[in-house]
Amino acid sequence: MAKAPRNGPYICGIDAALDVVSGKWKGLILWELDEHGVRRFAELRRGLPGVSEKMLTQHLREMEADGLVRRQVYAEVPPRVEYSLTEHGRALNEALAPLGAWGVERIRRERSDLVEHRDAAALPRP
Amino acid sequence: MAKAPRNGPYICGIDAALDVVSGKWKGLILWELDEHGVRRFAELRRGLPGVSEKMLTQHLREMEADGLVRRQVYAEVPPRVEYSLTEHGRALNEALAPLGAWGVERIRRERSDLVEHRDAAALPRP
DNA sequence: CAGCATCCAAAGCGATACTG
DNA sequence: CAGTATCGCTTTGGATGCTG
């Protein structure tokens, strides 16, 4: 079955945008397609370590339905299918850039927090 | 129970950022707190039409744990608790702005699609 | 007022097996 | 190669009732 349709209307843009990128792998898929331009199913699979075949298919179908991804099928043997971003998908990716930067900062912060906590545990209370 | 801890490390910043904003109401909570600066529990509840008490509590706790939200408790009767954004929360909000703009554009696009479909169904063929 | 506890349904996700 | 089908576990979200 396809993605469950949203019951109510969106309240704001953030809401509408998060709806299409919420999914364990969607951010990575976007990133992978933006990076390489065009990718085949198996290539994407290799680029997303740990993704199951089913989830990859499901996410790609949803993103196609949301108008983010284009799916080009070649009638060949063996079969070949190529995925790429649509114009909207590329725009979304650009809109995600600042968020990505924030995320990188968060990762960096968490790493140094670990160090601080280790220090705090070792030091006596002031 | 708290949010399930992520099993693996983040692959990219988008990943790390989406992890903290994925949740049915987190985008709206961020928006509400940014808009008003400080909000009490019941005020937030009113600002998020349809949210259940449980989900609001759960999301606020997770966002507190993620360092996005500050929770200030006043030892009074009746009890009072105020929520506001931390510095990181505000930074996240700024990083979300382009995404919000994309979302608004998406909503607009979908509406005009609906109109086109309605017109196509209701109007006689030219 | 601001919550916590409990139960329940739906959605998300993974593993496996099979197909054109 | 690029999927589809099915099963079952886990996570998310909602409804209700109770408490300091």
Image: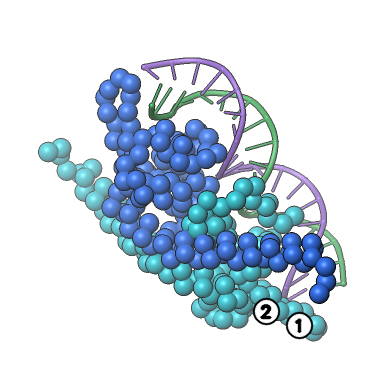
Chain colours: A cyan, B blue, C green, D purple
**Vertical side of B13 occupied by B83: above or below:** above
Q: Residue at x 45, y 41 (%)?
A: B47
Q: Where is residue D6? Give x, y as percent.
A: 81, 50
Q: Residues within 10 Å of mark 1 (few under 14, many from 20)?
A: few
Q: Are marks 2 and 1 in contact (CB under 8 Å)?
A: yes
Residue identifier under label 2: A82
Name the residue type under label 1.
Tyr
Examine the rendering and report whether any part of residue B105 can be seen.
Answer: yes
Quadrant where the N terminus of chain A is found in the figure = bottom right
Q: Residues within 10 Å of mark 2 (few under 14, many from 20)?
A: some
Q: From the viewer's perspective, tell me whether residue B35 is left or right of residue B118.
A: left
Identify the subunit bearing mark 1. Answer: A
Real-space Cα separation, disc 2 to disc 1, in angstroms: 8 Å
Tag 1 secondary structure? strand
Identify the subunit bearing mark 2. Answer: A
Instruction: Looking at the picture, tell me which residue is in the foreground, A99 or A75.
Output: A99
Q: Where is residue B33? Give x, y as percent.
A: 37, 46
Residue identifier under label 1: A74
Residue B75 figure quarter? top left
Examine the rendering and report whether any part of residue A53 can be seen.
Answer: no
Instruction: Looking at the picture, tell me which residue is in the foreground, B17 or A13.
Output: A13
